[in-house]
Image (spheres, helix red, strand yellow):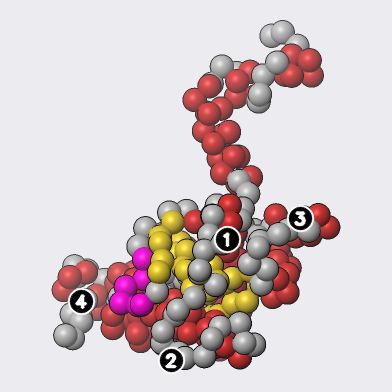
Amino acid sequence: MKETTKATIGRFCCLCCLSGNETICIETKMHYNELMQETTFEKELSFVGDKQVFIIGVDEAGRGPLAGPVVAAAACCKDQKFYIPEKLKKDFVLIRDSKKLSAKQREKTFAFIEERFYYGIGIVGVKTIDRVNVLQASFFAMKSALTDLRRKLLSIGSLSSGKLEIYDGMYLLVDGNQTIPNISVKQEAIVNGDSTVKSIAAASIVAKVVRDRIMNDFDKKYPNYGFIKHKGYGTREHMDALRRFGHCPIHRMSFRPVLLSIPENANKRFSKVLKPNKR
């Protein structure tokens, strides 16, 4: 086989190309580009000059886990001109999709967000999740986060006083493909917004860090399940613990893997053991 030199590799973008596997190469580059994609204030800047006072990013954490609450955050940059000083560019770069940061990076970036953003937090527990379903619980958490943020903005005089439930002077950028229902505020949904819009990314980091801290505390209360490692997601370790110890008070009983982990339900169909929601 011809010896591969650095000069030879230099003519190709990666070893996949060198081996002739261009399909893998394309997938690798797409994955790399996704990981390296930076969020910007481009969307927020498009509103500068409008009558909207605060452009707010909204996101949630914890829809997928089998245990624990769903947490939402609403975040808006303190500087609504969205200027990034040169000396802070490296810090702002880390405000991206929380899933693309390590736990250590999220904690560090959360501290920076606390300095540069106003934010509100909403937390909805497992009883409500099981009662209304996790999607609706996420919307409840988002509304709670907005109420919390508005209260803070009112306290510092950034918004005019008035009824707390009226969100005049706000425009929401919501991560995902659905806006928040039954709320009197201008908003739009942005698919993959946590990967492109800086304010949404900030909200995603706040929500993730807050929820991880909650799950770390639950790990002390329910040490058999390893919540400090998987944060309630359905990992093999978590499923093994469910089968061994059964469910605990923070498990979501409306989630299939939790219900089917109960011995008497093991051989039943999910529809037979799921309790219908009361209307």
Residue linked to disc 3: 89
Residue at (49%, 25%) from the top-left corner? 23
Name the front one of labels 2 and 3: 2
Seen in the image, is 162 located left or right of residue 229?
Answer: left
Q: Amino acid at mark 2?
A: Lys
Per the model, the C-alpha gap separating discs 2 and 1 is 25 Å
Residue linked to disc 1: 48
- Sequence-first tag of 2 and 4: 2
Question: Foreground residue, 60 or 116?
Answer: 116
Per the model, the C-alpha gap separating discs 2 and 3 is 38 Å
Residue 179 vertical placement versus 35 (above, below): below
Per the model, the C-alpha gap separating discs 4 and 1 is 52 Å
Per the model, the C-alpha gap separating discs 4 and 3 is 52 Å
Q: Amino acid at mark 1?
A: Val
- Sequence-first tag of 4 and 3: 3
Q: What is the x, y in percent for residue 48?
A: 57, 60
Q: Secondary structure at mark 2?
A: loop
Q: Secondary structure at mark 1?
A: loop
Q: Amino acid at mark 3?
A: Lys
Q: What is the x, y in percent for residue 240?
A: 45, 69
- Sequence-first tag of 2 and 3: 3
Residue linked to disc 4: 273
Residue linked to disc 2: 163
Name the front one of labels 2 and 4: 2
Q: Residues within 10 Å of mark 2 (few under 14, many from 20)?
A: few
Give the magenta part as a residue range. 179-184
Q: Secondary structure at mark 3?
A: helix
Seen in the image, is 79 located left or right of residue 276?
Answer: right
